[in-house]
Image: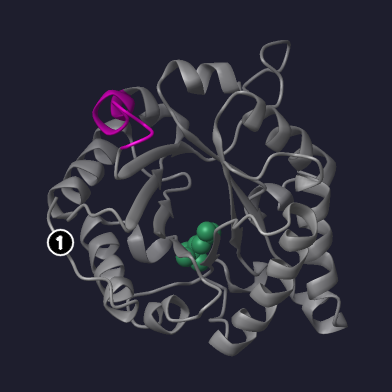
Amino acid sequence: MFYFGTNLKMHGTPAETAAFVEAVERGLEPQPEVQCFVLPPFTSLPTLAPTVAPTPATSHLWLGAQTMHWADEGAYTGEISPLMLKALGVDLVMVGHAERRRGGETDAVVRKKVSSALRHGLRVLLCVGETQAQKERGTGAAVVSAQLGTALRGVAADRVMVAYEPVWAIGAAGREADAAEVQAMLKTLRGTLQTLFGPRHVPILYGGSVTEANCAAYARLSEVDGLFVGRAARRADGFLRVLAAALEARSIPAGRA
Ligand code: PGA
């Protein structure tokens, strides 16, 4: 399976996001080997959920949330609970994105969120990645392995995906990661996942300044199970172009279901 998704971050009104998803749906050529997903802002989920996630387990385009609280309910002003997501038919939640970690989300909080999401039957996209300073100190691999271990120790692996996103490669100020460097880090992550889960395969996606021009190099890596794209997929035509280039690099034929 090749995974391909985008995080829309804090972009788009419900109407704008609906137009985005509609255009993506129109251009998508669903096929069994490819699973796409979109993570819109919370406010767009109620509009999109009925159209995108009528049967979440089989849909070729999963709808996901960008984060959630770990508690089912309570005095947590402004937060969204897993029960609220499930009530909308949302099947996927991202946890631990670098922009949330930067805002104070610790590994301990990430762990609580992962456990809660899995307990509620949601799929989890766990984001991990080292900062520029950690990379320079040579501690990147240790940091990323520790992030994985803290978040995933003791949970069931079957609804978990990991996105490796070096913090220094994310966003407009980021720089492109070298594909060989990514492959080396993914091998480390793969080792950590094998220690945690044995032979069970946990998909690892790569993210961080992925574009139409560079996605082939990442998509071809043997350790990459998918791509996670921000800015380059913010518009539907960009989403479809990066996807097409990635599938070509993977030698996955475009096909209509
Ligand atoms: P970017 O974002 O592709 O715009 O760097 C990636 C991300 O934050 O997941």
Q: Is residue 87 above or below residue 163?
A: above
Q: Position of residue 235 (x, y in %)?
A: 27, 57
Q: Is residue 174 above or below residue 158?
A: below
Within the image, what quadrant is residue 191 found in? bottom right
Whether residue 135 is in magenta: the answer is: no
Residue 171 visible: no
For disc 1, the marked residue is: 255
Q: Say whether mark 1 is within 8 Å of ligand 1.
A: no
The span shown in magenta is 47-58
Q: How many marks?
A: 1
Whether residue 48 is in magenta: the answer is: yes
- On screen, residue 234 versus residue 125, left or right, reads left
Q: What residue do we see at 47% from left, 79% from top?
A: 218
| Front position in the image: 155 or 125 | 155
Residue at the far top: name it.
Answer: 74
Q: Is residue 67 above or below residue 83?
A: below
Residue 235 visible: yes
Q: Position of residue 42 (x, y in %)?
A: 46, 30
Q: Is residue 73 above or below residue 45?
A: above
- On screen, residue 3 versus residue 130, left or right, reads left
Q: What residue do we see at 56% from left, 16% from top?
A: 83
Within the image, what quadrant is residue 41 found in? top left
Task: Tell me which amino acid carries mark 1.
Answer: Gly
| Front position in the image: 131 or 92 | 92
